[in-house]
Image: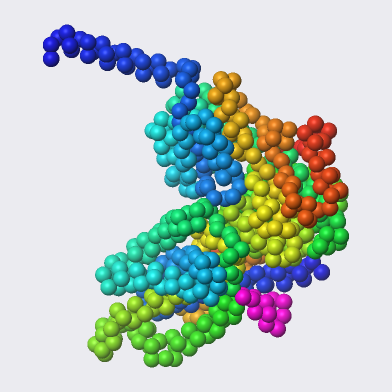
Amino acid sequence: MAATDLAIELLRASVLAATPVLLAAVGGAYTYFANVFNIAMEGMMLIGAFTAVVGSYFARSWAVGLAAGVAGGLVAAALFVLFAVALRTDEFVTGTAINMLALGGTTYALRQMFGVRGAFMSSQIRALPRWDLPFGPVLGGHPFLVYMALVLTLLAEWHIRRTRFGMRLRAAGEDPKTLDAAGVSSSAMKAWSIMISGALCGLAGAYLSLGYVRLFSENMSNGRGWISLAAIILTRGRPLGILVMSLAFGLFDGMGMSLQGAGIPAQLTQMLPYVATLAALRIYSLRQKL
Amino acid sequence: MSSRRLGSFVAAVVVLTMAMTVGVMPGAAAASPQKVAYIINGGLGDLSFYDSGQAGIDRIAKEFGVQTRTIECGFDPARYSQALQAAVQWNADVVFVISYGFEDLLMQYADQYPNKRWINVDTVVENSRRTITNVDFIEEEGAFMAGAAAALLTTDTTIKGVNSDKIIGAVGGDDDPVIRAFLYGYEQGAKYIDPKIEVRAVFAGTWDDPVRGKQAANQLYSQRADVVFQIASLTGSGVLEAAAEAGKYAIGVDSNQNGLQPGHVVTSCLKNVGDAIYGVYRTIANNTYKPGEVLEYGIRQGGMGLAIDDYTRQILPARSVQRLVEIQSKISSGAITVKRYQ
């Protein structure tokens, strides 16, 4: 049955497409609560995607690749901390700078290290293992980071809501002076939130280049970090809300392409995920008023 | 400075200025070109279109001993005019330009610098002085071959992984006239083999996102397509990967991509940008170049073709390969006419 096959493929693809957005957005939720204007997720993700491929290629191991991806995200986050927290530069400008550095830097490093331009493909890049979990055709057989992303989302929900760290994090965002007076450095909490965001963006990048596909191409994050930012703002940082938003985005993204088969012009269907985001924004603003 | 010495200095300046004026007079193309620029709207590294052109430029540099310079715009409209300006300031004698997206700017520059040879590749641009030479590829012919290859594959259920449905797919980077031309030819080629074949196309909406390319290809495979033709630059590398993972097939584009996912890329629809660039440059070198021409490069001229190699024979049976070769020579001789999109 072609119709059910397509429906299954659509749902399956939406889980796959949602994962990088989810991972980055859950990390970004930490910075949201710490009141850090974090627009560097796009860049941290791209750096993570690149370092993951480098690690996986040279060590011939997906585990090293994954670790390298996280490390790449952390290095970018450390830069953000150095400038935006320690040296008190503007967060927006710093984030923009990191995004530009990520695009130019990975492109340059790609050409220098591998002597290729555009995309780097090799059979020596080891992909993340897939887990054949008995969850049916839609949820089974994905790269294991998909399942890890779900677990991390639940953990983050608990971590931010229910732990001492989470409370201090939110206090750093809402009333940093009181937190400082209570003997906890609000700057340190901000720095922690950025580092967590960097690690998760690194994971998201590794998922793109070792999980979804097994290659690195210039600018392969392609706006996914921005979608994450939209998901965070829409759900006001609630990890469970972010999960729903990411899945919805993944679904609409895939539906956009399949609707072309129904004779709707491609230019219109490509708008779908963004129109859906706008609609969601409106729904949230309505709920806020009630 | 004495008046006599001043006089000879002025004379020297006058003579020099005259020499320079003569040098830049239109039509005074006596000296052979020294500098060749290659301006591309996108970036190198696509393993297909732009890289193929670069191969032609490299061949020119080697055979004719000229300096060459490649200017990449990375699809950034802000760089288009800078790129043309850079070529002019570098004093390029010959400028090959892939001007898709900045045709108007090219016209202005060509009108302003009529003594340079402007060769526009892949589209047709006419400036008021008619000095731009155009290299136009007959994409429909190459895509016809790709469509025929896809049809021979999907109708042959003895090939591993091929289902009984006669459905073939294509992933385009975006909905534009060049991609439409490819699809038009692809469909004609498929129907030439079997009129019942159905073609499904998806436009990914991006040229540099392999993740989306893979997503699009997987959708087509789930709709029981056996083979997907990628016409999407870097996005297409995701299509090739999807084919390998799903145990299905793909067709590459512009350069020979058969070896990128061995056993899953049946063939590649070649657009020999490099050969065309080299061919035009040779006419400049032997003084048969005429500015303002539209040069059509189809299968007969070697501008388009199909990459049939051991990777192809590993997938398609010998009789199908034989059939493809026959179709190629029929298009070349005019026995088959492929309709143009526009």
Q: Is residue B220 located in the magenta-colored stretch of the structure?
A: no
Rendered-image quadrant of the C terminus of chain B: top right
Q: Nearer the viewer, residue A58 or B166?
A: A58
Region in magenta: A129-143
Rendered-image quadrant of the N terminus of chain B: top left
From this viewpoint, which residue is outermost toward the top? Answer: B4
Q: Position of residue B195 (x, y in %)?
A: 86, 48
**Direction from residue B153 to residue B25 in the image, left or right:** left
Residue at point 34% right, 14% down? B18
Q: Nearer the viewer, residue A62 or A279?
A: A62
**Direction from residue A239 to residue A122 in the image, left or right:** right
Residue at point 73% right, 70% down? A7
Q: Is residue A135 located in the magenta-colored stretch of the structure?
A: yes
| Residue B269 seen by the camera | yes
Residue at point 70% right, 58% down? B262
Q: Position of residue A18 (x, y in %)?
A: 58, 72
**Direction from residue B332 to residue B240 in the image, left or right:** left
Q: Is residue B342 above or below residue A20?
A: above
Q: Nearer the viewer, residue A235 or B129?
A: B129
Q: Position of residue B215 (x, y in %)?
A: 65, 63
Q: Is residue B20 above or below residue A261?
A: above
Q: Is residue B133 above or below residue A232?
A: above
**Direction from residue A262 to residue B31 in the image, left or right:** left
Q: Nearer the viewer, residue B227 or A256?
A: B227
